[in-house]
Amino acid sequence: MDLLQVVHDVMSSPWLYALVFGLALLDGFFPIVPAETAVITAGVFAAGGQPDLLPLVAVAAAGAFAGDHISYALGRAAGGRSTRGGRALTWARSAVAERGGLILVVARYIPGGRTAVTLSMGALRYPRSRFTAFDALAAITWALYSALIGYFGGAAFEGDPVRGLLLGLGMAMSVTLVVEAVRFARRRSARRRAAVVTARR
């Protein structure tokens, strides 16, 4: 049995939904888990009929939502200690203080950023009700984005899921690179403005 047949068997199994849920949940507080890749891959095969797209989106969103709340609870339990280490956590603390829920939604698309933000929101005692509302939006949009990227890749290369998967992963990587480029440009611009203000004093 070749690898592609094994993948086909996994994608047609009802246990796939439990697997996607579990990976999305773990990814909320253990960011090396390849949840986004799993959802994109399942989306590619959904274009061929299995798995079903809507249940895929639902379980991915539910898993992400649950995982983010575990991360929030870990940050809340650790208190201020969880915001002391690492550049990502320092960035997250500043971002949460400035923009609150908006940064939670955006961070869902930044590798590692989502965990840093949810931990920091818990540690900073960001209101749980507001966290839940914004995180629901973040989880749903992330699940839709990941599944649909895979779905459109699979539809573009119907009958050739490998190319569809490569297209889907390439599109996701391109979006991530654009987001990182915009963040880099904004930070650089902010540093230049700060330097100009300092020079004028």
Image: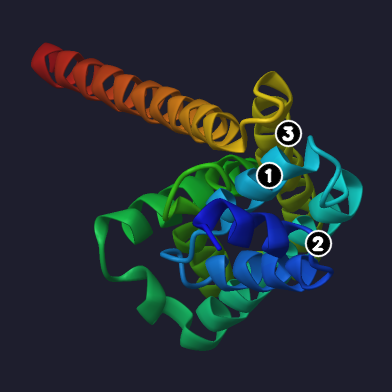
The numbered dot on residue 151 is 3
What's the residue type where badge 3 is placed? Tyr
Task: List the residue tagged with mark 1.
Answer: 142
For marks 2 and 1 on the same chain, the one whose residue lies earlier in the sequence: 2
- Vertically, is 76 above or below 173? below
Q: Residue at x 44, y 61 (%)?
A: 116
What's the residue type where badge 1 is placed? Trp
Q: CA distance from mark 3 to mark 1?
A: 14 Å
**Residue 125 seen by the camera:** no
- Vertically, is 111 above or below 89? above
Q: CA distance from mark 3 to mark 2?
A: 16 Å
Q: Are marks 3 and 1 in contact (CB under 8 Å)?
A: no
What's the residue type where badge 2 is placed? Val
Q: Position of residue 117 (x, y in %)?
A: 50, 58
Image-quadrant location for residue 46: top right
**Residue 7 seen by the camera:** yes
State left or right for residue 191 relative to residue 80.
Answer: left
The numbered dot on residue 59 is 2
